[in-house]
Every structure is written in C-alpha cells, then in structure tokens.
Amino acid sequence: MALGRYGIWSIELRAQPNADNGEVIEAVQELEELGYGALWIGGNSDISHAAPLVEATSSIVLATGILSIWEHDPADVAARHTALTAAHPGRFLLGLGASHAKLAAAYERPYSKMVSYLDALDEAEPPVPVNERVLAALGPKMLKLAADRAVGAHPYLVTAEHTAEARSTLGESALLAPELKVVLEPDPERARAIARDYLAHYLALPNYTNNFLRLGFTEDDFANGGSDRLVDAVVAWGDAERVRARTDEFLAAGADHLALQLVEPSDAKGLPREGYRRLAEVLRLKG
C-alpha cells in the first residue's frame, strides 16, 4: 500500500454519517493535491469515517488511527472492510488499537484481546488481509504481534529513540508508521506552551507514561504538560529547518512513514488548512 513518506493524522478530518461533509472532503482532496500520501483519522475512528473520503479522492490512503477493538464487532468490521476495498483497492488501511483503560469500559488483558480480534478477522469470510491492517503498538509484545499478524505498527506519541527500538523489534520488512506532533512556531516558549496544552491529556494515560518510563523518562517529566526534555522529544516544533530536521530524525531511526499531527493553539478555529500547506512546503512534498 503506497503510503508515501508523509501523511496527516487528524481527529477533525473525518466524515460523519448523515452529515454535510463538504468542508472535510475538500480539505482531504487538498491534502492529496499537496502530496501527502495518507490521512490517519485519529481518535476512536471507524470505517464509516473513512469511506466517504476514500470515495471522494483518487490516490491518498485513508487509515483508521485507531479503530478500538473494544467497540467494534470484528465480523462487521471485516464485512465493511471488504466492501470498501473491493470498490477502492489499495486505498484503505485498517488501523486497530486496544485504546486505554480510562477510555474503554471493557478494557482487560489488551494483548489477549488483540490476538482474539485478529483471529476473528482471519476467520471472517472473506478475511481481512494481513497487509491491509496495522496495529497501534508501543511495547515489545504488541510490536512483535504487529510484525507477525499485521503489515506493521502505528505507534502514537513516541520518540525517535522508541522508533529505533521499534524497528529493531519489528524487523526490516514490517511497516513502521509512527505519529509525530508538529507545532509550526519558532519561538521556543510559545511552541512548548502550545505543545504542553495538548499533551496534558495524554500524560494522564498510563499506556503512554509507562512507555516513557521504559525510555528513561521519570515521573517529573510528566508534570504540567511535560518537561522541556519530554516536549522536545515528542513534538517537532520550530521553523521550517528545525521541523524538517526533526522529521528526518524519525526517518533515520527507522520510520517508513510519518503520520504528522499539526498542533495549533487551543483557541484556533476551524480546520488548519493553511498549516497543512505550510507543512507541505516545509517537507518539500512537491519538490
């Protein structure tokens, strides 16, 4: 599946059932024109959020980032996946994740649940092909599962060091497509403030903080939206040169594709389409 080197990760860019999705469709069509290879629909996304966007575009890959395995029946997911990919081959990537204990009421033994969910996708008629599904994975066990039972891994909120470790665990052939937050702001104080405002929610979720502890961070790094050290490790902020250098770090560490999430000030209104254009220039997508 041709994801390209860069994609966009967004919660806002999702189609809604029985709604006027004109603005979202227009924005996704522009992402395709700008040269982004994929759109990762963030949050607890579903195939219904992606299907109208696949239908309205011609080449960009739509991926769920992620579909929660606690909230969607695998047989139904497999059937809808089959219908969408039959009509638009190579255009949809099923991203699966175990979410978080604080967000999923039925959360228990997430690794075992993921194994059984993949078993159900394999047993569906027709099954979901291994190369058309990707797993949200942070720790070694889930990363190994992603290499064995999916096309690869889509880690969220990680560092370049984690990317290097993930590549080692996955092996050379598996897809590694980490999410990376971007703040297009050259002033360090303002950029970090924007990042901290957004990160505070995630630093209350043990899946992420436990992963950071494995990487050598401490509890002190999680206070008040994150220490400078943590913010600088998980957010690419700055001018064009600095942001491009940070994305290059992740690619050099072993990422095949970066799902870039543009983070704007909390009072920003509407879709950040000008930001997507600026980011495309930073990455020289058309050059």
Image (cartoon, rainbow, N blue to C red):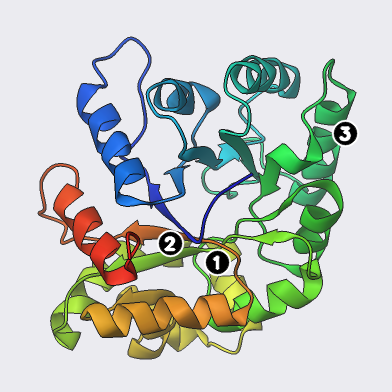
Q: Earlier in the sequence, mark 1 or mark 2?
A: 2
Give the SS element for disc 3. Answer: helix
Element class at badge 1: helix
Q: Which residue is mark 1?
A: 208
State which tag comes first along the sequence, 3 or 2: 3
Q: Is residue 212 left or right of residue 127?
A: left
* Quarter of the picture holding the N terminus: top right
User: Closer to the observer: label 3 or label 2?
Assistant: 3
Q: Is disc 3 in contact with disc 1, using a CB cutoff of under 8 Å?
A: no
Which residue extends farthest front?
287
**Residue named by callout 3:** 119
Residue 175 seen in this snapshot? yes
Q: Position of residue 163 (x, y in %)?
A: 62, 75
The CA span between labels 3 and 1 is 26 Å
Q: Position of residue 256 (x, y in %)?
A: 60, 65
Residue name at image x 33 percent, y 88 percent:
228
Q: Amino acid at mark 2?
A: Tyr
Foreground residue, 162 or 91?
91
Residue occupying the point 23% across, 16% down: 20
Crowding at mark 1 (Cα within 10 Å: few <14, some 14-19, many 20+): some
Q: Earlier in the sequence, mark 3 or mark 1?
A: 3
Kind of residue indicated by mark 1:
Tyr
Q: Which mark is residue 202?
A: 2
Residue at the (86%, 29%) spot, across then down: 122
Instruction: Assign the C terminus to one quadrant of the image.
Output: bottom left
Residue 23's image quarter? top left
Label 2: element kind = helix
User: For mark 3, does the 10 Å Cα neighbourhood hold few (<14), some (14 to 19), or many (20 or more) residues?
Assistant: some
Note whether residue 159 is visible.
Answer: no
Q: Position of residue 40 (x, y in %)?
A: 47, 45
How far, Cα to Cα, is label 1 from label 2?
A: 7 Å
